[in-house]
Image (cartoon, grey):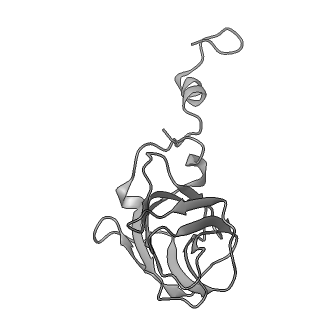
Amino acid sequence: MRGCNGIAAPISEMDEELFNPRRPYRFFHPRQAMRGRATSGTPTNHATVSLYNNSTGQATLAVRDVTISGTASDTVAIQYAQTQIGTTAGQQAALVANEAITPGLMAWIDSATVYSGDYVAALTAQGAFWWQHDYPFALVQPGFSLIFQDITVAHALTVSLIWEAIEIDQLDWFF
């Protein structure tokens, strides 16, 4: 391959042209992954579940799998917020047994605040929604929460997620 001056470019320059940035994100990394679940009690207001990125560094959470269950045919509004939402902790564990915990906190709250949602998950007649794509559902930056809220008052909600903590320079190169 020739560089811009007509001289053959060194291998390292060619690699950057094809695989920019230097650390491309490829496939799934189980040792960087967590799974978690938060189940609301029966709320008075709106059942709201969140995944908060509590990273003190540059880790971005790539949410790879989403399963939502609740009352049949309910609608769940989903959006980001630049704060931690929820105070009652959910359960979470490293995807690989005995590995270190990576960033990400699941929690829930009975919220009077209504989130409009930039994405809506319609629960089936069995009260379920699941993500059926190979690409991530969401990318949660440090200091942000991914929020799931049942738009019907007084209906309980359970959200289960699998996410990976990836470095910020890997963000634009999923394949």
Name the residue at 48% across, 89% down: 42
**112 sits to left or right of 163:** right
Q: State left or right for residue 92 relative to residue 45.
A: left
Is 67 rendered above or below residue 18? Answer: below
- The residue lying toward the viewer, choosing from 91 and 74, is 74
Q: Position of residue 109 (x, y in %)?
A: 57, 85
Q: Position of residue 162 (x, y in %)?
A: 42, 63
Q: Quadrant of residue 80?
A: bottom right
Q: Looking at the rendering, which quadrant does residue 34 occupy?
A: bottom left
Residue 13, placed above or below residue 155: above
- Residue 92 location (% of width, % of height): 40, 76
Q: Residue at x 48, y 67 (%)?
A: 73
The residue positioned farthest toward the top in the image shown: 6
The N terminus sits in image quarter: top right
Quadrant location of residue 146?
Answer: bottom right
Residue 112 visible? The answer is yes
